[in-house]
Image: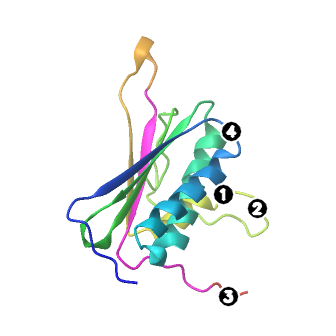
Amino acid sequence: MVTVAPLHPWVYALRLPRDPRAVRVARMTVRAALDGHGRQDAVDVVELLTSELVTNAYLHTEGPASLRLTGLSGGRLRVGVWDSDPYVPAPFGGAGDDSVPLAPLDSGSGRGLRLVQEYADSWGGWALGDGALGRGAGKLLWFEVGGRATLPLLLK
């Protein structure tokens, strides 16, 4: 199959309710969009990292989230996840070290941001100004992967 690169970026946006099924819906949406654009080479890594950011939005906020998937020139892909909490964690620009420590092997959580750090080409985040009635408008975390985004083989 031959895929023609679009002259202009393409964008898909999805509003996600605060629902544990939202993570699965986000993964399915990313997979469908990338398959539709002939980007099967990037599905695994983008789906994994998107899942991690949407999971964090669900676990650490009380409100909805939004997902934005953008196809950029040169085969690059950008994913942004907005949520209602203004706290920006490391390594996305939050206070403290720019790296995320490894989670203990027996831990059931704590690996998501480390995965972004390991597999994305670039990432960032910022708190979004004040919302109505003086409340924060949340934050946006994003990552980009290059034209040939793949996950390495994991050894047991």
Q: Nearer the viewer, residue 93 or 56?
A: 56
Q: How far apart are labels 3 and 2 at the CA level? A: 19 Å
Q: Residue at x 59, y 30 (%)?
A: 63
Residue 107 badge: 2
In the image, which residues are magenta?
Answer: 137-153
Point out residue 93 in the picture as x, y percentages from the top left corner: 40, 49
* Quadrant of the rendered image containing residue 127: top left
Amino acid, disc 2 = Ser
Amino acid, disc 3 = Leu
Q: Nearer the viewer, mark 3 or mark 4?
A: 4
Dot 3 or dot 1: first in sequence order is 1
Amino acid, disc 1 = Gly
- Residue for badge 3: 155
What secondary structure is found at the residue carrying circle 3? loop
- Residue for badge 4: 19
Residue 127 shown left or right of residue 89 in the figure: left
Q: Where is 13 relative to 52, above or below? A: above
Point out residue 78 in the picture as x, y percentages from the top left corner: 37, 59
Q: How far apart are labels 2 and 1 at the CA level? A: 7 Å
Amino acid, disc 4 = Asp
- Residue for badge 1: 110
Question: Mark 2 near mark 4, Cβ–Cβ under 8 Å?
Answer: no
Dot 3 or dot 2: first in sequence order is 2
Question: Mark 2 near mark 1, Cβ–Cβ under 8 Å?
Answer: yes
Dot 1 or dot 4: first in sequence order is 4
